[in-house]
Image (spheres, rainbow, N blue to C red):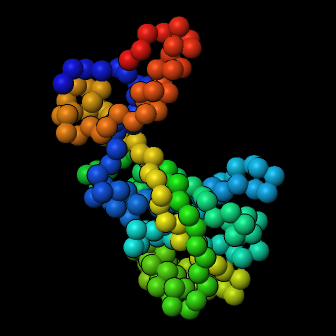
Amino acid sequence: MAHTHDHEIVSIYPFTDVEVDQLFANAGECVLMWGTKDGWPVGVTHAFVWRDGKLWITFAAHRHRASAIRRDNRVSVNVSSASYRPDASPELPTGAITVKGTGEFFEDDETKKWFYAALARKVSPDSAEGEAAFYSLLDSPLRVILAVTPVKKIMYNSKTAGAHMAGVASEDQLGERLAVDKDRMNAERARRGLPPR
């Protein structure tokens, strides 16, 4: 494949389903984003768990984000490989995914039990004492759990992008060029007097 410098076309660098699972399972943090009543977009960093095709996050019920998401459950969550642990395998996928999704709240004991244990283990994987302490911290009466079900994933696979720019990526590694990098980009190029790509 020819060497390319077309850094404006990035929709062709998706992750496979396996890579999505790997990135979500190994990333330490995510940024949860929602809209306020007066239209401001806001985001907060959270530890999270990826399970059953959902991103699971927790915070106190009195936080503004709780009432905002109950009012409008459309949220976004950004997950980046930059939050991998320092000892993470270099074989893991790198890049970032932004999920557009819908949020659902849980406060039942069964969900709290598995989720607190999973999050405590993820945050303190090398310390039973740290795991127990974090579980105890999570187990508070005001805590709610938010499960975000993905509706759309906006992906950037930096390993594939690097290989493509170096001219060593195969065609089957590349994704479909989405409308944003065809129609919208060429409309903007035309508006600026530039030739289409």
Q: Is residue 8 above or below residue 83?
A: above
Q: Is residue 50 above or below residue 120?
A: above
Q: Residue at x 63, y 55 (%)?
A: 33
Is residue 87 visible in the rendered image? The answer is no
Q: Is residue 146 left or right of residue 173?
A: right
Is residue 29 visible in the rendered image? The answer is yes
Q: Position of residue 61 (x, y in %)?
A: 72, 76
Q: Residue at x 44, y 51 (%)?
A: 153
Q: Residue at x 31, y 37 (%)?
A: 176
Quarter assignment of residue 26: bottom left
Quarter assignment of residue 196: top left
Q: Residue at x 43, y 29 (%)?
A: 181
**Residue positioned most to the bottom:** 109
Q: Position of residue 16 (x, y in %)?
A: 29, 52
**Residue positioned most to the top:** 193
Picture quarter with the C terminus: top left
Q: Nearer the viewer, residue 149 or 114?
A: 149
Q: Position of residue 192 (x, y in %)?
A: 56, 11
Picture quarter with the N terminus: top left
